[in-house]
Structures are given as C-alpha cells and as structure tokens.
Image (cartoon, grey):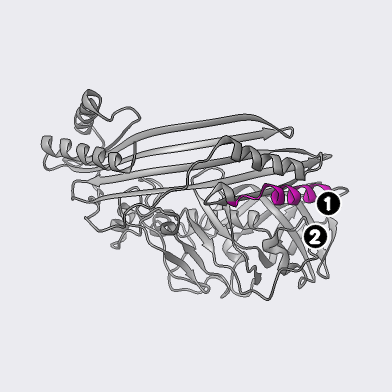
Amino acid sequence: MRVRELTDLAATVVELIGNAEPNADVEVTTDRTEQALTRFANSAIHQNVADESAGIRLRLHLDGRTITLSSSTASTGDELSGFVDRALHTVRSGPADPGWPGVAPASALPPPGDAPLVGAAAERAAVVRAFVDAAGGLETAGYCRTTRSERAFANSAGHAAAAAFGSSAFDGIARRDGSDGVARVETDTIGEVDGHALGARATAKAIASANAVELPAGRYPVLLEPTAVADLVSMLVVYGFNGKAVTQRQSFAEVGTAQFDASITLVDDAPSLGITFDADGTPTARRVLVDAGTTAAVTHDRRTAAESSTFSTGHSLGGGSTGGVALHAGISPGASTGPVPDDIPELVDPAAGSLLASIDRAILVSDLWYTRVLDPKSLVVTGLTRNGVWLIENGEITAPVKNFRFTQAYPAALAPGAVHQVGPIAVGIPEGWIPARWTVPALHLASWNFTGGASG
C-alpha cells in the first residue's frame, strides 16, 4: 500500500462517515510501516525479523462525544464498512468531551519525499559483523534496525496530508569481566552506520573500565557524552516544554525567561526528517524551544492549544493525555575550535573529543540509565551512570570510576553559568521506548550531583 492508496483510503473513510453523519468531526490516519531488526548476543546474530504492517486510525466526534478506533485489517469492502459502522455505533455511547478542540483546518503541505529503503538483512548483518570484529573477541550484544513509514491523513474540514520517512539505528555493547562499553547512533540510512567505529569505541570503553575506583558522593564537573545528553533532552521535552504541563503548572518552563546558559539552543525539527504533520494533521515546523538560553516556546497539540488560547505547534502524539511533545529535538552544537585532536583516547566519543583537552578535572559519563522523575516541576531526576565512567584530570583520562547514583535537577545543570562547553558535533541518538530521535552534542557542565556510589 503506497502513499496514494493510503491517501485514498483516508479520504474514503471521511466520506463514509460524512454521508452517514454530516455534522460529525472526523480525523483519519492511515499508515504503512516496514520494520526490520537484527539482534545479536554472545557476539552472534540470534534474531533477524522483518515486519510490514498497515493500519487505520479514526477519531470521531459527534454530539459532544469523542471516540478513537483503529484497525489493521479494514481497507476495502465489507471490512471497511463494518469499521465505519462500528465507529458510528460506538460514538453514541462514548465519553463526553466538552474540551473537543475541533479538527485541523485545511492547509497546504509539501508532497511526501522518498523515504529511505529498509534495506536487506545482509546490510544489517554487515554492520553487526563490523561491530563484533572490532571488539577483538570481547563479548558483544545489541541490535541494528531499519524502519520506513508512509502515512496519510484526512479530516472532515477538507484537510489532507501525506508523508514518508525512515531511519536506521544501532545500539551495542562490548563486555569484558563484567564491564560494559556502549555505542549507539541513529541515522537516516543504514549506509551511514559505521559498525567498526562503534565497535572500537564500545570495546575501548569496556577495556578501560577495568579496576575502577570508587569516588565519594558529591558534586563534580562532568563531561556528558551524547548518549547521556540524550536523556536530558528527552526529559526536558516530555516534562518541561510540554504545553499541557505548563498549563497545569507542572513545568519549570517560563517563556521569555533566560532559564538556561546562553550556549544552549534547543530546537525541534521534525520536517527535516520528512515528518510534515502530527497525529492531529497539524503541519509541523522547525520550532526553537530555547534560543541562546532563553525559553522561547513550548509545544502544543490541538487540545492543549485550545485550553491555553493559543495555536497547535504540530506536536500531537494522538493520545490526548500526553499533550504536545517534541520527539525530534536537539541541542545545537557549539562553535568549533578546530579539528578533533588525533590523540584523543579511542574510548571517547568523537563528539566529546575536542572538549577533553581543556578540562582540568571532571567525570566523563558515557550513559545515564534507569532515570526517573522525582519532582516534575523542578525536573529533579534520579538515576544511575552506566557503560563507562572515568576521571578526567588535566585534559587526560586518568582512572576508571565505579558507577554513581545521581539526583539532579536537569534545568539547573544547564542554567546560566552552569555550562562550560557545548561540543561542536551533534549526533543522532535513538530513544529506546518511543519513536524519537535526539540530535545532541557532548556537554561539559560545571556541576552534577552524585548522591551515592557503589557502596551506597
């Protein structure tokens, strides 16, 4: 089912509903997704799967009630008629929805571009093989995945849209004597994933983690690699710049206030990835959330926008309960001070390499794990370091460090004066739980609150 067919199917459902109930508000999203995944453990591929799915999602508002139905089989004939009949029957007993914001008005959108092909299993296997070979016999595990999606939208206001997009991602670890090193990346195509470079970095991290020392809890300057910075961005956009959280006074974000260091600019740019409309059909646009340290905007879907007497920013996830979330956000890289030095340790992500030499003393953190929000208003988060921690002294890595627990307000870590350096290279990092990509540099921060070590 290609984009044209998806577009026709969405329009057909809107027409069928309109013929039966001319006063109904209708939104229809149709999609087709190809996914392929190669997983490996014990340095060998143990699973290679591919899936192709198509679906239709209908949101119907009639007589003050709203329902959402979906199907993976309704596309033609009796199945489609049955799907529409079920929706019309269900909405009459659906929940009252006094806050229904209406459907998105008709607007012009660019035609869909060409999404990257999913690629063959052999291509993913080659990336895995390069990662494993670079590990030099260390135990490895992880995955390589590719996705391609085509999506169409239509509503009862005459609005129609279509998009095509895709990505490739790799996440792997190398292990030696219980110490893990990590490397992960998300790119547009599988050809951009360098399995050997990722494997060499993960392996160097695992080897260099041997005989780690334990440092006392306390506040330390940190150099966060992109794999760790991605967690900051994900928490900021879900809990901070979410218009619903702002409206409910559960967010720190204050538009127009310099809440961050002037070196921090945070931008969401879904259109650059081919995603031109959200789950409400609202067009997406490049949106600056933080402009040189000043909170510039928050994100809305149609419902939270109506509640706040503003406009949707094109960030609906379709659920209605989450508010608008920027799933393609990134921190703009800092100015380059020259080429990345040739002598940086192999364990350091190149995105952090150019910052290393200028650091007197700090903790290098590869990854943050099991992070949980303690206070959404101030965005205090607790979690653990993982997959490699080291002490930096006089521009050099001097010792591996045992993992810490931390309790840190994320906005405070990026507050005015708290950011020493922003790395000049931003890389894509996949999100493990939601379909998001964070494009982030390394960050050298003045203070991070480590509240416990390996001994408690």
The residue that disc 1 covers is 208
Amino acid residing under circle 1? Ala
Q: Quadrant of the N terminus?
A: top left
* Closer to viewer: mark 1 or mark 2: 2
Q: Do callouts 1 and 2 mark residues in contact (Cβ within 8 Å)? A: yes
Secondary structure predominantly adopted by residues drawn in magenta: helix
Q: Is residue 207 magenta?
A: yes
Name the residue nearer the viewer: 455 or 400: 400
The residue that disc 2 covers is 345
Give how far across and how far down residue 51 sits, in percent: 48, 31
Name the residue nearer the viewer: 408 or 400: 400
- On screen, 121 above or below 170? above
Q: Provide the residue span drawn in magenta.
A: 192-209
Distance of label 1 from label 2 (alpha carbons): 10 Å
Q: In terms of image quadrants, where is residue 249?
A: bottom left
- On screen, 267 above or below 60? below
Residue 264 relative to residue 64: left or right: right
Amino acid residing under circle 2? Pro
